[in-house]
Each structure stands twice: as C-alpha cells, then as structure tokens.
Image (tube, helix red, strand yellow):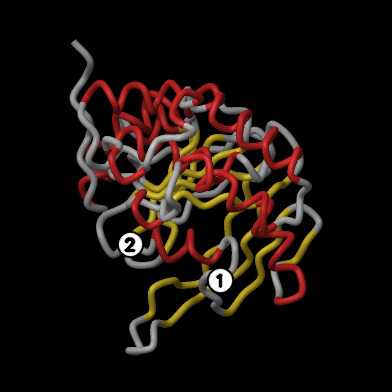
Amino acid sequence: MPILHEPGPTLPLITPPVNGGPILAVESLSFHYPDGRQALHDISLTIHAGEKVALVGPNGAGKSTLLLHLNGLLQGNGRIHVGQLTLEKSTLPAIRAKVGLVFQNPDDQLFSPTVREDVAFGPLHMGLKAEEIETAVAHALAQVGMAAYADRISYHLSVGEKKRIAVATVLAMQPDLLVLDEPSAGLDPRARRNLIDLLRDLPQTMIVATHDLLLVRDLLPRMVIMDNGRIVADGRTGELLTDAVFLEKHGLELPCPTV
C-alpha cells in the first residue's frame, strides 16, 4: 500500500517493498509523556518479514519513543501486533522474545561481570536449559564476530566492541525483529563500517532509528521519516534521499556523495 503522509510535487508516491508477511503492525498509536507533551500522533506502520527499515528524523521527532513501544517498555493509545500476537500484558514475555531492542548506549544493556553472562541473560530468563543457553550464547557471539571475547569484562571493551556485544545479547534470544536505536553513534569510521557489514549480514527483519543517512543509504532500502511525532513519509531510501528540500524541511541533511 503506498504511504505518503505529506504529498508535494517534489516527493514521489512510493510503495515500500513487501518481502514477506507482516511481522509488525502499529495501528493509530498515540502517546503523551507525564508532563503532557504528546510525543506520538496517530502512528500507523507496517513492516514485513525480511525488510530492513530506517526510522529517521530530527531530535524530538518521536523515533526512540516509538521504538520503546514495540516491546512494551512504553504503553500508549493504539494497537501493536507482532506476528500473530497483539501486545498486551499477557503477551509481553512472548513479544519481548520476538522483538529484540538494542539501546543507543550499550552500557545500558551490559551489566554482568563477563560478556558470556551478558549474552546469556536473555536465554536464561526465557527458561532455556543450560546446554541450550550455551549454544545460544556461542552462536550469537559468532554472529557478531566476538566469539573470542566470551570471558572478557564488558566494561573494558571499546565502544564498537560493546555495541557488537549488545547486539549479541539480543540475538541470543533469536528475535524475529531486531530494533536498534542510533547504532552508529559514537563509533569511529572503521567500527562504523564493521557495524554496517554486521547488520547487513544478519537475517532478521530490522528497524533502525538513526541520524546517520550514510548508514541508511548503504544498509536500509526503506526509509520512514518522522517529525513532531508523526510519520511524514515512508518509501524507498534511494528516492527519498534525492529530495534535499523535503529532507531539510524535516531537519535532515542530504549525505555527501561518495567520492
């Protein structure tokens, strides 16, 4: 279904790709913070299995607020479906296993004495057996190229290494949907490129909130633009990135062309 929330002569009507069945459906979601500020206004969004989707917009657009609703960390007015499940109190454990959220600051996600224990935390609380947990940990660390770090102390790792481990803590639960908030923030160019390569190779459906439009261009074929708590455009990244006027209007800057 074509989605275009702010029609105009410079912004083409775009139909997002459909690679599989709906894995996430957000319906008419609105949210007020306790101080009365409305952070989300009637958000509706559908993501299909296999898609890699960018969520972009200026600071205060509502990107992180939306992400925190996807596994019930915040609860607004509206409905959220993950696969065949509707997000509600009784389905929270199952949905949190299906929707893996990676925070912007990896120190918010890493708190155990060793990397192994950090990555084992999720599977342990899913009730897996010891051998299943060990298998899940080994596989997740291998996926992010950090198998040799299992017995290291997370606190002593670089920011790039911590971000990989944070991704592994989520992958260990084998989520259907991987949700990342500003994954490239604070990374040097090499670590950033390594992260892009890592995310490209992961099989999970993915939604990535970011200001990094170069990452979006290189990794995420579909782009959803938010501003002032609303979705203002949703379509193919390659087409939306050509509209400098529209991007600037919504607090975004066109990435410099690759030399």
Residue 122 in percent (x, y) is at 61, 52
Numbered disc 2: secondary structure:
loop
Residue furthest to the bottom: 35
Question: Distance between the Cα atoms at labels 2 and 1?
Answer: 14 Å
Packing grade of label 2 (10 A; few <14, some 14-19, many >=20) is many
Query: The C terminus appears in which quarter of the rendering?
Result: top left
Looking at the image, residue 103 lies above or below residue 189: below
Looking at the image, residue 200 lies above or below residue 232: above
Residue 59 lies left or right of residue 229; in this view the side is left
Looking at the image, residue 122 lies above or below residue 184: below
Q: Quadrant of residue 205?
A: top right
Residue 32 in percent (x, y) is at 43, 82
Residue at mark 1: 29
Query: The N terminus appears in which quarter of the rendering?
Result: top right
Residue 89 in percent (x, y) is at 71, 77
- Residue lying at 22% horizontally and 34% vertically, measured from the top left: 254
Q: Quadrant of residue 230?
A: bottom left
Total marks placed? 2
Residue 56 lies left or right of residue 28; in this view the side is left
Amino acid type indicated by mark 2: Ala
Looking at the image, residue 162 lies above or below residue 226: above
Residue 109 in percent (x, y) is at 43, 54
Numbered disc 1: secondary structure:
strand
Amino acid type indicated by mark 1: Leu
- Residue lying at 61% horizontally and 30% vertically, measured from the top left: 138
Residue at mark 2: 61
Q: Earlier in the sequence, mark 2 or mark 1?
A: 1
- Residue lying at 18% horizontally and 25% vertically, measured from the top left: 256
- Residue lying at 44% horizontally and 38% vertically, measured from the top left: 165
